Amino acid sequence: MQNAFPHIITQIVSESPRVKRFFLKRKDEKPITFLSGQFVMVYNEFFNLDQQSRSYSIASVSNTPEEIELCIVLNETGKFTPWLFSLEIGHELMVSEPQGGFVFRGIEEPIKHVFVCTGTGIAPFRSMIHDSLMQGCETVLVFGNRWKEDVLYWDHWNTLQENNLLFRFIPVLSREEVPQFKTGYVHPYYTRELKDLNDARIYVCGWKEMCNQTRDRLKELGFNRRQYFFEQYD
């Protein structure tokens, strides 16, 4: 547990039937600084080595919060997340310093940014989108889920869209048809946003199959590895 420090759970919010938001504050009350998109490792020293830690993207909007937010989906067949979901406010956890290279890249001039994600892949995009808008970029979020109940931060994205003309939110459902949502998979919607563009920045995070398919489509559209960035999970 190198570079890990005690953190206290200050708040737990049920975001969906299978997802909880955990708010953590360092026990020594030092501020937490991270780059948009980074993650932390959460430890349980009582588990076997192969179960002892898991990585979770930081879902906080601000880059220098007094506490960080983690958005975690329950894996009912595993051990780690059922243990996390059993914890209560005030519990102490060992958590690493922020780390990882899937981060928002600065730009010299405003350019269109398209963020594509599924499920809890939304977590690192909260701070990334904040940074994109702060740099004056047209910013589009294409967010895919199976069911309406799976959509995370629904109010946050709609409020942001109402209050910022640079931001557009495109929610997509693959298993049901619901007003205000697009139907199917994310691919035709981000493709439409990028068509006929020579330059843009594309960030992709979520299910492995979606990431692989998106990479292929971005190559077909003529984008290169300096223009798109990926973080995937199984």
Image (cartoon, grey):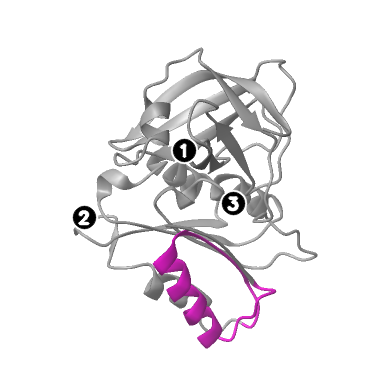
Which residue is drawn at the image coordinates 44% and 64% (left, top)?
Answer: 208
Q: Quadrant of residue 27?
A: top right
Q: Earlier in the sequence, mark 2 or mark 3?
A: 3
Q: Is residue 166 above or below residue 16?
A: below
Q: Which residue is mark 3?
A: 129
Instruction: Return the residue at label 2.
Output: 178
Q: Give the residue type at disc 3.
A: Ile
Q: Is the residue 211 above or below the residue 136 in the image? A: below
Q: CA distance from mark 2 to mark 3?
A: 25 Å
Q: Is residue 145 left or right of residue 135?
A: left
Image coordinates of residue 12 in percent, x first then y, are 43, 23
Q: Earlier in the sequence, mark 1 or mark 2?
A: 1
Kind of element beneath mark 1: strand
Q: Position of residue 6 (x, y in %)?
A: 64, 20
Quadrant of the drawing holding the N terminus: top right
Q: Residue type at mark 2?
A: Val
